[in-house]
Structures are given as structure tokens and as C-alpha cells.
Image: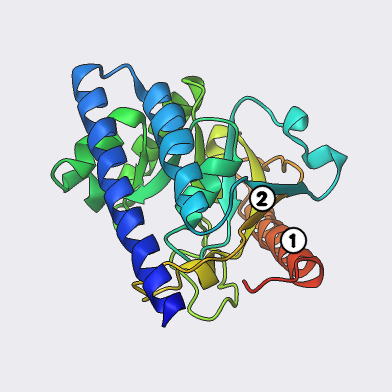
Amino acid sequence: MLRFIASCFRTLLGLLWSTVCCSYALVTILIKPSAATYVLTTIGSNMWSKNMLRIVGNPEVNVSFESSDAAFDQWPSQAIFIANHRSQLDINASAAAIPHPIVYLSKASVRRVPILGLLNERVGTVFIDRSNPTAAKQSVDRLISTLKRGISVIVYPEGTRSKDGTMLPFKKGAFHLAAKSQAVIIPLHIHGTRTALPRGGLLMRKNPVHVRFGKPMTPPAADDPHALQVFVKEGQEAVERMQAWHAANIPTPD
């Protein structure tokens, strides 16, 4: 009973805090459209995401690296991040762990959502329309523009949240964009968010969250379909390798 009450309290607190942060971000970007970096770092990462992790029991962001080649100081200034996806809290875990302003690869339909679409538009979110191949160049152009502003992009290549933690096959969208823009891909694996807030779940539970980074991956030439297919496979294998490490070394539920 006490755990249920605690979960209800965490959920209510998380919803209230998300509303405060989203409202603050929207007002800021409406008043000052050039404040994207401030909105993404000060509000999105430090104010919202790090405190959302605190609400589920993480006073600090737990970060590790697969090797010295994966450390923060080895990262290029422009990158596309790829990660597993199990929970809505993955957004907060990603933003809290990555020390760069980041936006997300999003469906084109989000652009048409009142308020949310405007906020995403102004911070540099990269929209992609999988049903419209002619829009591909626009997505690449927007990605390059966002990267040049010092803002990185994170993608969850599974396309949806896993129900049981099993990693789904990666879609090639992020890898295609990387090849077209020649932006490096940095893989990462998020552990613990599925227990804290599972897909379909309504209540947030206390659980440690860990993020592990792999070394940067250089994309192949954009005009080599076979190399792109291999690149997608290598990206998924990198995330799966870190998933196995988490399972073997972190004694908390995923």
C-alpha cells in the first residue's frame, strides 16, 4: 500500500513538474525564438530531465562508457545519438546524460500539433515523413542546420517502445540521415526506465537509471546501400552489447 501511495505521489509530482517546465519553455521560445540552446539545456536537461530522474530515485545521472574512445572528450561537436526505447522516461534519461543540447527525430505530424509543434519547430527538432520520400531532402537539410547550431539529435531507431525489454529491429532512418549529412553516430543504452515507467503504465516507480555510451561511429558514403545496411546492423549490435553489459553488471531491474 505504501509503495502504491509513493508511486501516486511520484506520478503527480512528475506531471506537475512537466507542466511547469513545458510552460516555461514555451513562453521562453515565444518571447525569444533564438533561445533554443537555453530551452534545451537549462530547461529541458537541467530543470526538467534531471529532476524527473530525481523523482524516480536518481539524485545523480549514472553514466558509464564502453571504452576510453566513448568518453565525452572523444565526441565530435556534431553527432546523432541512437538509443534503445522502453519508456517515456528515456527522453529524460537521454537529455540528462548527454552534456550537449539535444533534440529528437520526430514524426512530421507532430509539427501540426498546436503549441507542441511550434515548440519543436523553434528548438530545431528534425521532422521526418516516412510516407513522403520527396520530403527526405528537407529532413537532411534541417538536420544539417540543427547540427550547425551546435544542437545534436537523438533517435530511437526501434520506432516504438519495447513491451518486454527485447530490442526491436532498428529502422534505417537515423543511419540514412547520418550518411547523407556525414554526421557521426554515438550509440547509447538506457537501463532502468522500463521499471520506473513501463510502456502502458500510469504510475512512476522508484528505480535506478543508468546510461552507457559506446564509441562514435563514422557513417559510410550516402550512395552505398550495402554499406548503409551494414552500418545499421553495427549500430544495433553496439546498443545490444551495452544492453548485455548492463544486464551483467547492474543489479537492479531494467
Q: Nearer the viewer, mark 1 or mark 2?
A: 1
Residue 155 shows up from this direction: no
- Which quadrant does the N terminus fall into? bottom left
Q: Is residue 90 above or below residue 248?
A: above
Residue 128 shows up from this direction: yes
Q: Nearer the viewer, residue 192 or 137?
A: 192
**Color theme of the render:** rainbow
Residue 228 located left or right of residue 30 = right
Q: Judging from the image, what secondary structure is the residue with disc 1 in?
A: helix
Residue 116 located left or right of residue 153 = left
Q: Position of residue 120 (x, y in %)?
A: 29, 38
Q: Position of residue 127 (x, y in %)?
A: 34, 44
**Residue at position x 74%, y 61% in the image:** 242
Of the numbered discs 1 and 2, the one sitting upstream in the chain is 2
The image quadrant that residue 248 belongs to is bottom right
- Which quadrant does the C terminus fall into? bottom right
Q: Is residue 51 above or below residue 1?
A: above
Amino acid type assigned to the residue bearing label 2 in the image: Pro
**Residue at position x 36%, y 76% in the image:** 200
For the residues bearing labels 1 and 2, Cβ distance under 8 angstroms: yes
Q: Position of residue 223 (x, y in %)?
A: 59, 43
In the picture as drawn, the residue positioned furthest to the front comes out as 2
Q: Is residue 192 above or below residue 235?
A: below
The residue labelled by disc 1 is 242
**Residue at position x 42%, y 69% in the image:** 6
Marks 1 and 2 sit apart, C-alpha to C-alpha, by 9 Å
Residue 82 located left or right of residue 247 = left
Amino acid type assigned to the residue bearing label 1 in the image: Met
The residue labelled by disc 2 is 187
**Residue at position x 67%, y 56% in the image:** 235
